[in-house]
Amino acid sequence: MKTRVAVIFGGISVEHEVSVISALQAVQNMNSEKYEITPIYISKDRKWYTGDVLLDIENYKDLKKLMQEAQPVRMQRTADSRVIVEKDPRPRFGKAELAEVDVAFPVIHGTFGEDGVLQGYLELLGLPYVGCDVISSGAGMDKVLMKRIYRDAQLPILDFVTFYSSQWNDDNTGWLNQIEESIGYPVIVKPANLGSSVGISKAENREELEEAIDLAQRFAQKLVVEPMVSNMTEVNCSVVGDPSEVEASVCEQVLGTDEFLSYEDKYTGGGKDGGSSKGMESTNRVIPAEIGEGKTAEVQRLAKAAFQTLGASGVARIDFIIDENSGTVYINEINTIPGSLSFYLWEPAGRPYPELIDRLIQLALKRERERGQLMFSIDSNLFSMQNGGAKGSKGSKQS
């Protein structure tokens, strides 16, 4: 019997298009003899759709037409504990159920997909899902929380200053002074909870810093400012596994068009003509990274430590910065649903994309089996033990 997989993609984040590319790549590499696939596309206005029309990337050039041809749906847990995809709205007559789902495969990058929100919804449905759980997804998405966790674990990170937009608006001069005193120029300004380098820019003086902060707060309310490592090498490493068992991929050396990798560098090859639709696979890179055996081993060790410290599961890509002046390796960030699912980092080691997908689904089902042994409720009814009405035992005294 085939495993019924719902591939969920799209979403309302600024990484919507990247998600579509990554998801269609994954679907194309799923073994049709093992899996029965239901594509579920979440539009930018939060509506859910399914249908084979969603599997052709050319159709996304005309979203209005695509939404007219796709079937609006919702996911529902039935009285007999099945999770199904059904028509939305549910028809008064005729069949509403379109598919049953055994496991969800989220491929939504960024806000509301990679940050634990979707994972929480799947938890409520009682549906196994690929990738990190709610807590590790949320911690991985929030750069500030991630940095604090890694700092407490004594993993190497860059110094940082963080604040909310409201704090900046109340005292921007104070924050400018703090950044200049504690970090100095040049700096990188980032939204705290976005990926794909969206809203990120560098600043070499106060005027540029104000402009960078204004840009970043268009995308997020919480911001983070880090020192700019001018003479650096960007290296990425993927990790597959769960908190108990992990393995690291080969490393890649990323070749950007500037001192840091921009959104355009990652997904359009840095060109202004729109590039191709190969996702992270199309980025200019060297695989394996030309950083020597010692640095490669250090990056792989830190990648596994970053993955396990966060309690991650599935596949992640950990991005590093190597300061070429000092030789120090810094963890930059973890991507818990990486672009293209980092399949290109596993193929050189002899793990083709279809096998990577098999492994991710196996890990999802393993976690569900382990959770099935846990107790989530206690067989008791506190209301039946109360004699104090709606106020319970409030105000009762011991005689």
Image: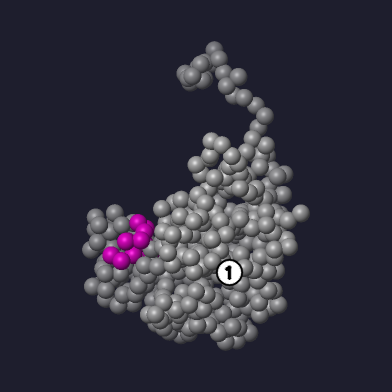
Q: Is residue 330 magenta?
A: no
Asked if residue 302 is positioned above or below residue 52 in the image, the reply reads below
State the image coordinates of residue 354 (x, y, percent, origin top left): 68, 69
Query: Quick one: 315 or 305, which is closer to the camera?
Result: 315
* 247 w.r.t. 295: above or below: above
Which residues, given as a range, are shown in magenta? Answer: 214-225
State which quadrant residue 364 falls in. Answer: bottom right
* Amino acid marked by disc 1: Gln
CA neighbours of label 1 inside 10 A, class few (<14), some (14 to 19), many (20+): many
Q: Quadrant of the N terminus?
A: bottom right
The residue that label 1 is drawn on is 25
Residue sticking out furthest to the right: 1
Residue at the location (34% across, 75% down)? 202
| 145 sits to left or right of 223 | right
Quick check: can you spot residue 50?
yes
Q: Residue at x 42, y 73 (%)?
A: 263
Outermost front residue: 93
Left or right of residue 99: residue 275: left
| Outermost residue, top side | 399
What residue is at 52 percent from the left and 15 percent from the top? 388
- Kindly indicate the quadrant of the structure image that contains residue 226: bottom left
Pick the front one: 299 or 369: 369
User: Is any atom of residue 367 visible in this view?
Assistant: no
Identify the secondary structure beneath mark 1: helix
User: Which quarter of the rendering shows the C terminus?
Assistant: top right
Asked if residue 246 lies left or right of residue 70, the reply is right
Residue 230 in percent (x, y) is at 40, 82
318 displayed left or right of 240: left
Task: Identify the residue at image location x=58%, y=53%.
Answer: 133
